[in-house]
Image (spheres, helix red, strand yellow):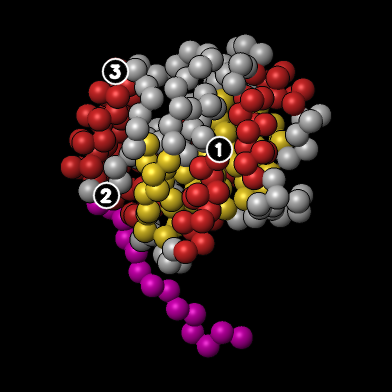
Amino acid sequence: MNARHPELSVVVPAFNEEDNVVALATEIAGALRGRVDFEMLFVDDHSTDGTLAALRAARADLPELRVLHHSARSGQSTAVRSGVKAARGTWIATLDGDGQNDPADIPKLLAARDTAEPAVKCFAGWRTTRRDDAIKRLSSKVANAVRSRILRDATPDTGCGLKLFERAAFLDLPAFDHMHRFLPALFQRDGWRVVSVPVNHRPRTRGVSKYGMWNRLWVGIVDLRGVGWLIRRAKRTAVQEIDPA
């Protein structure tokens, strides 16, 4: 691996996932070693359990692992952005820290990227078979339907944590709390295309979900107004340098 400039950086936000992070990091390494030059950045969002200690200890066996720590709890979107800003890779893959996204699907996203047109800057995981409880499935179904009707982002599962995108394009997006829920629409706002790729989804086997009906459904619906405003106010134009030296 080129430690300074790997091709891929895998960013994983984590809050109180001490029972999941080491197993997940080990799975990511197993899925990517020998396939692509990569690094992993786990961003501990000021956990109150042993998440940070577990990640520190795991570095002895996982040389690709880097650990970031928030000094105060800041939320999933901020954790993702912290990881992307610190990343050295040209491309970023993201997964949720609960282990429900399957690291074996990352090569599938990379393969989709390798055959896509240059205008495609985001490859969004599409959980065609959900392994969540009834409340999560219902809230996600309603939120996806409302979001799709308002934003017209043509993405069936924008809430999937498994995504692949170009780092530079991501850092050009407007940053705000909960932005991770709207990444396809935000990439499209900047003139890029998004492709959805069917991926595996696994049941949570350890730890406790951090999302319920309120913060999964209603908060996302409230944010739609702001995202809609950003899309309406977007302005893009081609830029050409005249007589470059």
Q: Where on the picture, by quarter, is residue 69?
A: top right
**Rendering coords of residue 139 (x, y %):** 27, 24
Of the image marks 3 and 2, the number of the one nearer the N terminus = 3
Farthest right residue?
Answer: 60
Disc 2 target residue: 154
Mark carried by residue 134: 3
Which residue corresponds to the image point at 51% horizontal and 42% vertical from the top-left?
105
Please name the residue shown 77% across and 22% down the image.
57
Nearer to the camera, 21 or 230: 21
User: Tag 2 or tag 1, which sits nearer the N-term?
Assistant: 1
- Looking at the image, residue 41 lies above or below residue 58: below
Which residues lie in the magenta part? 232-245
Q: Is residue 120 left or right of residue 41?
A: left
Q: Which mark is residue 57?
A: none
Structural crowding at the residue carrying mark 3, measured as other residues with C-alpha within 10 Å and reported as few (<14), some (14–19) or many (≥20): few
Q: Is residue 30 left or right of residue 127?
A: right
Q: Judge the density around disc 2: few (<14), some (14-19), many (≥20) Cα neighbours within 10 Å.
A: some
Q: Which numbered mark, 1 or 2, is in the foreground of this view?
A: 1
Dot 3 or dot 1: first in sequence order is 1
Q: Is residue 164 magenta?
A: no
| Residue picked out by circle 1 | 103
* Residue 210 on image: x %, y %: 44, 17
